[in-house]
Amino acid sequence: MQKTRIALLLLTVALAGCSGILQEDSTAPADGIEESGTEVPPTQTEQTATQATATPDPADIDSDNDGLSNAREQKLSTDPNNSDTDEDGLSDGAELNTHGTDPTIADTDGDGLSDGVELNTHGTDPTIADTDGDGLSDGAELNTHGTDPTLVDTDGDGLADDAELNKHGTNPRANDTDSDGLNDDRELDLRTDASDSDTDDDGLPDGAEVDMTDRFPGADPLQKDIFVEVDYKSRLSRSVIRDMTDEFEQAPIENPDGSSGIDLHIDHDDNLRCEDASGYIRDQIRYGCKSGGKTVTSPDNAGYYYIQIVSTVKRPGNAMSNGGLAVDSVAFVELASDEATGHIFMHELGHLLDIYDPGVDSRERGYSEYPSVMNYLSPDDSLGYARSDWKDINRSVQRVPGTTEREIIDQSNEQE
């Protein structure tokens, strides 16, 4: 009986141990399989990070993507919903952070050009009204004067744009305002008029008088000059030339430099090498040898008056006893004694200079009434013009017949 109790006790203990084992195994999860049920709540740190990602800080929001937060735009009075508040072509952020312009004003420097146009089109400074510092605003240079707002001297003539416009009256876009062959700054140094191609009104551009010293020797842009090219059978005598130049020097005509008179320059050019040179009209002016020869009606040098001294001149029956003839821009003088040749020369030159007194080519007024070499009743040795003649000369000398200022300037300096 005792043995039976011991056996039952051992069996009970064994079964109890197996029951505990089975109970523990039934509650443990299988390998690789998570236990089902309520999730473990996140920690406080993890929860805060998740909330920060889902809800950005209002202070950092940039609604219009212009590089400025809404909060900053409110402080700046810019529109947080418009990337370009002043609509000048630049974003608000670029204006503040890059260009230094005002994002609320389309034209920061008030020069008449929007900031975007200054930066992206003209290359001017949108924060300075006068980028090149020449005294003209950028807007005025572009919209009014046509000058370069980035260059003090647009035309490169040595004069600032503002000085040309407001002081000298010259063109800041052209280095030679009057197209006379001299730059504007050089004219100021020479005291010639930079806006007048012929300061002394003698028909010769200032540039030709200054720079063409071989073709126009002794010319002065501030004093009237007359150059005469002479083709001849025989030269004028020195004494006659001296008397003629003296007559012009004493002319009652004022010059820009304060002097009076005209400088007459006589250039003996070509010697006519034939026995019977003559000038005459048959449909056109011709001159040369009667037996044949070259027909020429203009001088070799543009800017010169042209006279030919020939053996004989066919002329109207009511002309002077000694012959002469002038038509358009050429005149012929019949060779005679020195004094008579000089007399005819001055008469025909007077025609080239457009003297139109009623007594010209007439015997109706006595020499005392009209004391001029243009009067048919004048003595054969007279060389002078009447005071009324000089008024005509002063007017006509402003243009040399048979040429233009452009032709004068475009020729070489070498005299022909």
Image: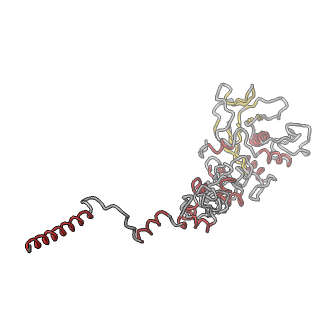
Q: Is residue 49 left or right of residue 177?
A: left
| Picture quadrant where residue 375 is located | top right
**Residue 293, position as x, y percentages in the image:** 64, 28
Tell which of 386 and 380 is nearer to you.
Answer: 386
Tell which of 195 and 25 is nearer to you.
Answer: 25
**Residue 226, position as x, y percentages in the image:** 72, 47
Q: Is residue 34 left or right of residue 231?
A: left
Tell which of 214 and 319 is nearer to you.
Answer: 214
Q: Residue at x 66, y 52 (%)?
A: 146
Tell which of 9 and 322 is nearer to you.
Answer: 9
Residue that protrudes farthest toward the front in the picture = 1
Residue 181 visible? The answer is yes
Residue 220 visible? The answer is no
- 362 in relation to 384, above or below: above
Q: How many marks?
A: 0
The N terminus, quarter of image:
bottom left
- 249 in relation to 269, above or below: below
Q: Residue at x 68, y 38 (%)?
A: 234
Q: Residue at x 80, y 52 (%)?
A: 251
The C terminus, quarter of image:
top right
| Picture quadrant where residue 347 is located | top right
| Picture quadrant where residue 169 is located | bottom right
**Residue 53, position as x, y percentages in the image:** 46, 64
Q: How is the image coloured?
A: secondary structure
- 12 in relation to 314, above or below: below
Residue that protrudes farthest toward the bottom in the picture = 2
**Residue 165, position as x, y percentages in the image:** 70, 57
Q: Residue at x 89, y 37 (%)?
A: 363
